[in-house]
Image (tube, helix red, strand yellow):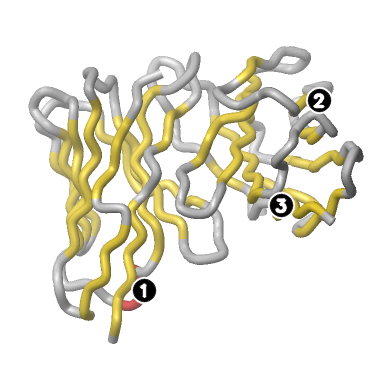
Amino acid sequence: DGGITQSPKYLFRKEGQNVTLSCEQNLNHDAMYWYRQDPGQGLRLIYYSQIVNDFQKGDIAEGYSVSREKKESFPLTVTSAQKNPTAFYLCASSILPLPSYQPQHFGDGTRLSIL
Amino acid sequence: GQQVMQIPQYQHVQEGEDFTTYCNSSTTLSNIQWYKQRPGGHPVFLIQLVKSGEVKKQKRLTFQFGEAKKNSSLHITATQTTDVGTYFCAGMGSGYALNFGKGTSLLVTP
C-alpha cells in the first residue's frame, strides 16, 4: 500500500541534544512538508520541499533543519536551538500544487518530548 | 500566507444534533481545503472548494465556499459518534504550502 511512514512514533530528547525524525513516502509525490502541532493549535508549517535538494522555510523554521537528498525521504532534525521542541510532528506529501493546490497526505506523526 | 480563522474552537453536541464550523479570511482565498483529524490520529483530506459560492456534499457533510471567497463552512447533519474529531480548514500559505486554521474540536455525546 502507498503511504507515508514516520518514525519513531515516540521520541525523547535530552537537553542540548539534536534528534532526527524520519519521513518516507512511496506515493511518488514531489512535494513534502513538515508541520508542528501543539495542543489546541492548528498545524504550523516548519519546512517544505518541492524537489530533491531544494526546500524552503515555513512559518516556524527556527531551530529546525531538513534535507531532501531523495524524492522519497524528507527527514527533520530538531536542533538544540529549538527551546520548546515538545510537540506532535506531522509529515505530509502531495503532488505538485500546480495549477492548483492538491490534497496533502499525512503520516501518523512523531510525538517528541523533553526528558 | 493567507490567515484563516476558525470558529468555534470547541463544540459539544448530543448525537443527532447538527454541527457547523466556520472558516474566515480577511483576504480572498484562491481555494480552501478541509481536513478531519480523529483523536490521536493524523489529518485526513475531506474536500477542496475552488469556485465562488461552491457547495459540495459528502453524505451528511455539506461544505460551502462564500461568494466572496473569504469564508467557508462545514455543516454536519445529525451528528454521529463517528464524527468526533477536529476539523481544519486550510488556505494558501507560504509559497505553495497550506496555511491551516486552528481547527474546531467536535465532541459528540451518545
Residue B106 versus residue B44 in the image, above or below:
below
On residue A110, the disc is 3
Q: Amino acid at mark 2?
A: Lys
Q: Secondary structure at mark 3?
A: strand
> The C terminus of chain B lies in which quarter of the figure?
bottom left
At 62% across and 29% down in the image, what residue appears?
Answer: A46
Reading the image, the residue beneath label 1 is: B82
Name above or below for residue B11 compared with residue A38.
below
Q: Chain of mark 1?
A: B
The residue that label 2 is drawn on is A70
Is the residue A47 above or below the residue A16 in the image?
Answer: above
Please name the residue shown 29% across and 36% down the image: B5
Instruction: Give the residue type that dot 1 points to.
Output: Thr
Percent position (x, y) of residue B80?
27, 76
> Circles 3 and 2: CB distance less than 8 Å?
no
Q: Classify mark 1: residues with Cα within 10 Å, few (<14), some (14-19) or many (20+).
A: few
C-alpha gap between disc 3 and disc 2: 21 Å
